[in-house]
Amino acid sequence: MWKVYLVKCADSSLYCGITTDLERRVKQHNGELVGGARYTRSRRPVTVVYQESHDSRASATSREWQLKRLPVKQKQALYRKTSTAQS
């Protein structure tokens, strides 16, 4: 199962990515494990604000591409809507 995720960085910027192990990936972004994106290295810590599951890497990559092209306000609305629904 592939995950598409948005993390919020310490400077309030958003980073979008895909992975099969979200917990490991967040640890990498936060410097707890080797790896992680260059973008997040200077913006730690990061926290997951949005995630969705996909059956294939192809569909996850396609959705990541869509999310990366959304304006910031739409990305924020996406994760705020999700957090409100979970409350």
Image: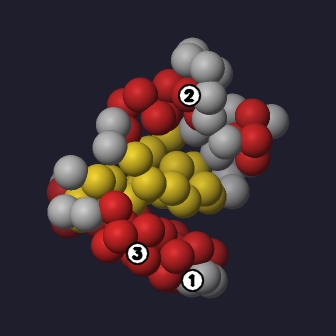
Image spot of residue 30 (x, y percent): 60, 27
State the residue at coordinates (56%, 17%).
33
Label 2: which residue?
28
Q: Are marks 2 and 3 in contact (CB under 8 Å)?
A: no
**For the residues marked 2 and 3, what is the alpha-carbon distance in whole angstroms?**
22 Å
Image spot of residue 14 (x, y percent): 62, 58
Which corner quadrant of the image does residue 69 belong to?
bottom right
Q: Check disc 2: other Cα within 10 Å, few if <14, some if 14-19, many if 20+.
A: some
Above or below — where is 82 with respect to 40?
Answer: below
**For the residues marked 3 and 1, what is the alpha-carbon distance in whole angstroms?**
11 Å
Q: Amino acid at mark 3?
A: Arg
Q: Amino acid at mark 2?
A: Gln
Q: Which residue is at the far top?
A: 32
Which corner quadrant of the image does residue 78 belong to?
bottom left
The one nearer the camera, 84 or 32, is: 32
Q: Amino acid at mark 1?
A: Leu
State the residue at coordinates (36%, 39%).
22
State the residue at coordinates (62%, 35%).
36
Return the disc, 1 or 2, that comes first in the chain's sequence. 2
The one nearer the camera, 80 or 39, is: 39
Above or below — where is 34 with respect to 35?
Answer: above
Q: Which residue is at the far right?
A: 42
Image spot of residue 20 (x, y percent): 32, 43
Q: Secondary structure at mark 3?
A: helix
Snapshot colouring: secondary structure
Above or below — where is 5 with respect to 77?
Answer: above
Label 1: which residue?
70
Return the disc, 2 or 3, that comes first in the chain's sequence. 2
**For the residues marked 1 and 2, what is the alpha-carbon distance in whole angstroms?**
25 Å
Q: Secondary structure at mark 2?
A: helix
Label 3: which residue?
63
Return the disc, 3 or 1, that comes first in the chain's sequence. 3
